[in-house]
Amino acid sequence: MNKQQFLAAIRQRIGSLPQQDIDRSIDFYAEMIDDRIEEGLSEEEAVAAMGTPEEIAAQILSENPRTQRPAAAPKSARGLKAWEIVLLIIGSPLWVPLLLAAAIIVLSLYIVLWSVIIVLYAADLCFVAGAISGIFGATVLFCTGQAAQALLFLGAGITCIGLTVLWFVLSTAAAKGVWLLTKLPFTHRKGDAQ
């Protein structure tokens, strides 16, 4: 193989590199061949002394940082071995019902928490109904001439208005607390994700 064929073979194998890196490598090996020819070797002997184009191309590619690929990350997840699969299948009559029971318990806790909030808001609606009926009853009683009972109904209606406002504020605070509590298991902090 002569010098031109040798350099062409190298150029072909390192074609994935940027052009300036290819030119620099080809110039380097061309100069090395020329130096050996000046030392008295023939062109074919100088080329043969360099090694094969495959070896030189592999060396050039390994020394070029643009072609080095990062080492593959170690696999963290591994497949199950046969005996582990057998144990999972044999143990399934035990662990499947336990897992299902745990899921049902968690679901019932969520339902109970939100049922409490619904009951709190329902009680607030009862106070609203009491306020409306107290004021309406007081109006009817005033019109019929029963002033004492009308004042009693009016006082009860105004009390229910105050309780409605207070109960709504408390119910809303409880709802926010339950919302934060129920979404807590699903939130991921940055430290946990890493």
Image (cartoon, helix red, strand yellow):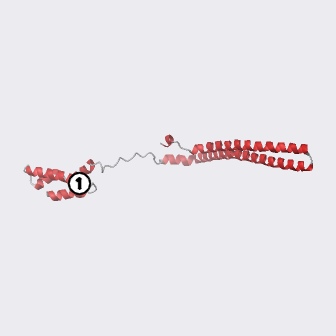
Q: Which residue is drawn at 85% across and 45% down?
A: 153
* Residue 72 visible somewhere in the drawing: yes
The residue to which callout 1 is attached is 22
Q: Nearer the viewer, residue 151 or 34?
A: 151
The x and y percentages for residue 10 are 21, 56
Q: Which amino acid does label 1 sit on?
A: Ile
Spot the residue most to the right: 145
Direction from residue 72 to residue 81 in the image, left or right: right
Q: Which residue is drawn at 27% across and 54% down?
A: 18
Q: Which of 17 and 93 is in front in this view?
A: 17
Q: Residue at x 22, y 57 (%)?
A: 11
Q: Which residue is drawn at 65% across and 47% down?
A: 107
Direction from residue 80 to residue 135 in the image, left or right: right
* Residue 48 visible somewhere in the drawing: no
Direction from residue 140 to residue 87 in the image, left or right: left
Direction from residue 169 to residue 74 in the image, left or right: left
**Image quadrant where one finds the N terminus:** bottom left
The x and y percentages for residue 29 are 17, 52
Q: Nearer the viewer, residue 24 or 105?
A: 24
Spot the residue most to the top: 191
> Dot 1 lies on which element?
helix
> How many other residues sit within 10 Å of disc 1, few (<14), some (14-19) or many (≥20)?
some
- Picture mark count: 1
The x and y percentages for residue 110 are 65, 46
Q: Which of 40 and 25 is in front in this view?
A: 25
The x and y percentages for residue 189 are 52, 42
Spot the residue most to the left: 40
